[in-house]
Structures are given as C-alpha cells and as structure tokens.
Amino acid sequence: MKFNKEDILKALETITVAGEGKNMVESGAVKNIMTFADEVIVDLEISTPALHIKKRAKSDIIKTIKEKVSEDAKVIVNIKIEVPIQPANPNLIKGKKIPGIKNIIAVASGKGGVGKSTITANLAVTLSKMGYKVGVLDADIYGPSIPMMFDVINERPLSKTIDGKSKMKPVENYGVSILSIGFFTTPEQAVIWRGPMASKALNQLIFDAAWGHLDYMLIDLPPGTGDIHLSIMQSMPITGAVVVSTPQAVALADARRGVSMFQQDNIQVPVLGIIENMAYFIPEELPENKYYIFGKEGAKNLSNDLNIPFLGEIPLVQSIREAGDNGRPAALQENTTLSNAFEKLTKGVIKELENRNEVLPPTEAIQMTNSVGCSAVKN
C-alpha cells in the first residue's frame, strides 16, 4: 500500500510545534515527505533545540498519521534543528574560554528562600558521583552558604604557584572544588560592599584561582536579577543557566523574571530549564503520601508557558534540611528518595546541556553600558 502525500499533509496541518505558532505545514517545518510501500518518512526542521519539544513533535506526527491516514503505516520522523543566524550585536564581545573548564552552569532564582544553594550543592555532588570533575563558585556575595553545606566553613584556600604566579587553590570536599567569599569572612560578619567591590572580589575568585580541569563549574548566583549577575556574565562565558523555583505564584513570578534576564538580547545565555524545589511534602512517618503545600506543578506549568524544558522536581523532606545544616548534601546517600530525585534531575541537566552544545555556538561574555544593564534588569 502506498500512501497519498496530500492526505499526509492534511494530517500534519492539525499539528502545531510548541513555540512555532503555526501548524507544521504552514510554518514550513515539514521539509519533505516520502512514501515507500507501507512506510512514511517525514523530514522536519524546527528552531527549538529542547529535547522534550523534539520528542513531542515526533510522537505527535506518528500518532496523527496513524489516526488520520493509516494505523498500519510505519512512520519515520527525521528532525533537524535550524540554528537561527543572530544579527551582530554591538554590546556583545567574544568571551575567552577559561582554560580547563568545559561547561559553566549558572544556577539562579528570581527570589530568595527557594533552595537554590541546596540544588547547587546536590547537583555538584551528584555530578561528582557520576565521575565528572566539578567545581562550585559561590557567587552569593552577601549570603554565602555553600561552605556550610559542604562542611568546610572553617577551611581556607591555600596558595599554589602556577607559571610563576600565586593562585588560590579551591577547597575540596566530596570530590567538589569550592571557592566562596565565605572563606574570607567570619560567619557573623556582614559583607557590606557596593557593586564594584563585590565584582572585584568575584573576579579574583574566578581568575586568580587554580581551578584545574573541570567538566562542570556550577555558579551559585544570588537571588534576583542584579549587579552581581551582570558582573558574572561579563566576566565569563556561561554555557547555560537553570532557574530554581518553588510552586507558589509569588516565586513563579520572580522565576519568570529570572528566565527573562538570561533571554535579553544583550545577554543571550541559553536557559537549560526550570527546576521545581519543595514540589510536595513527604512526612517521614507516611513516605507514600504527598502534600502539595505550596501548590501543584507550578514550575512545570511555567516551563510549558515559556517553552523551556522542565528539568525535574525535588520534594520537601526534613532530611534535606538536616543534610544541608550538617554539611553532608542529601545526594551523598545511596538509593534514597532524595538521592534518586537528584540523580534524575542531574541527568536531565546533562542531557539539555549536551543538546545545547550540539546545536548552539559557545556563549559569549557580554559588555554593557550602564543603560543596557538597567534595561536588562527592568524587563
């Protein structure tokens, strides 16, 4: 049996690729259709590299052709990603790749208190358990918490001479290299610095450090969308960013702004996805029960609205707080609800990062005037 191409086209006209706004045929996403006996081959070209968008498009095509043309059809879908050519932007400069560091991931949140540092610490530990070389830069100048979460609050970076220059050797624990402004202050000491001083301190942590070879550097950003964020993105080419939120509306509104910051024309850092923390509460005495204290699937719905991958959810469990306070991230445990959740989340981040590196060029560091910086923060 050979199928009619017109019938296939009509079927595909009922499908819309997420983010395209038009059906597959009208948008020009369908590039070619071939039929051979009982086989249908569809060549599709889309502009969104997200893995979940590609999977959904493939699934929709197969399902629709079988429903509207023939359930006996053997459907093969070939998907190509169209990489848009970006116009030259006078505010962008080519960022220098930091020697030895393959991927730099910014972990951000629109507001404080959503567990961004907890997510950063457990992502780092899980990556290390998987065999990767990992570093964490604690860029939360005014509220550094990474030293406590890694049980190194009393440690201090040592000096190491490289090519005749003295460099800071990051503190290490659980297979993760760590630098934080918290190593140079006491726990009760408030850091009262203006933006330029904070930026200078961060530059020292980045460029005056002997990070060595890292597969992943995670940057624990401060909450919000401000001066520190712009300084970091001016200093180094961020491979991608993840945004952490809890499910309630007030956190989601700020998470939306966090995503918007990275997507500004003068910034253009790929957002790898959204993570939902404190997704539901699991009481220790009733481990099978889930209580959606802050709302249900808020961050997941936001990711769908923004056409950004949903990377995963982490439950609210007492032991995760205890683990952070004791300086032993929950992901260090083996085969627990939390360690399994963090492993799944980490695999999602790796997959989206690899997908991003496959279809997009390296991110550029940015150069901004004051007016450009203000516009980035306002939107």
Image: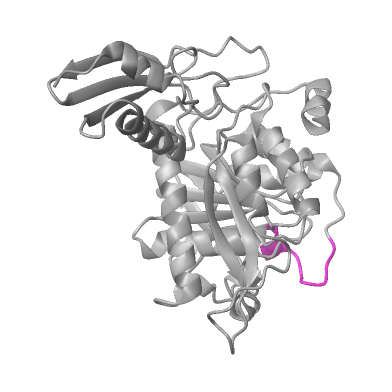
Q: Position of residue 153 (x, y in %)?
A: 65, 72
Q: Position of residue 84 (x, y in %)?
A: 49, 16
Q: Is residue 278 visible?
A: yes
Outermost residue, bottom side: 285
Q: Is residue 210 visible?
A: no
In this picture, which residue range is highlighted in magenta? 181-190
Q: Is residue 274 magenta?
A: no
In-front residue for pair 22/79 = 22
Quarter placement of the C terminus: top right
Q: Measuring 32% from the left and 18% from the top, which residue is drawn there?
A: 8
Q: Main secondary structure of the magenta part?
A: loop
Residue 230 lies in quadrant: top right
**263 on left or right of 311:** right
**54 on left or right of 277:** left
Quarter placement of the N terminus: top left
Q: Measuring 36% from the left and 33% from the top, which residue is drawn there?
A: 58
Q: Is residue 182 magenta?
A: yes
Q: Position of residue 180 (x, y in %)?
A: 65, 58
**302 on left or right of 192:** left
Q: Position of residue 91 (x, y in %)?
A: 68, 17
Against 168, residue 197 (above or below) is: above
Q: Report the number of discs.
A: 0
Q: Measuring 71% from the left and 34% from the top, which residue is drawn there?
A: 261
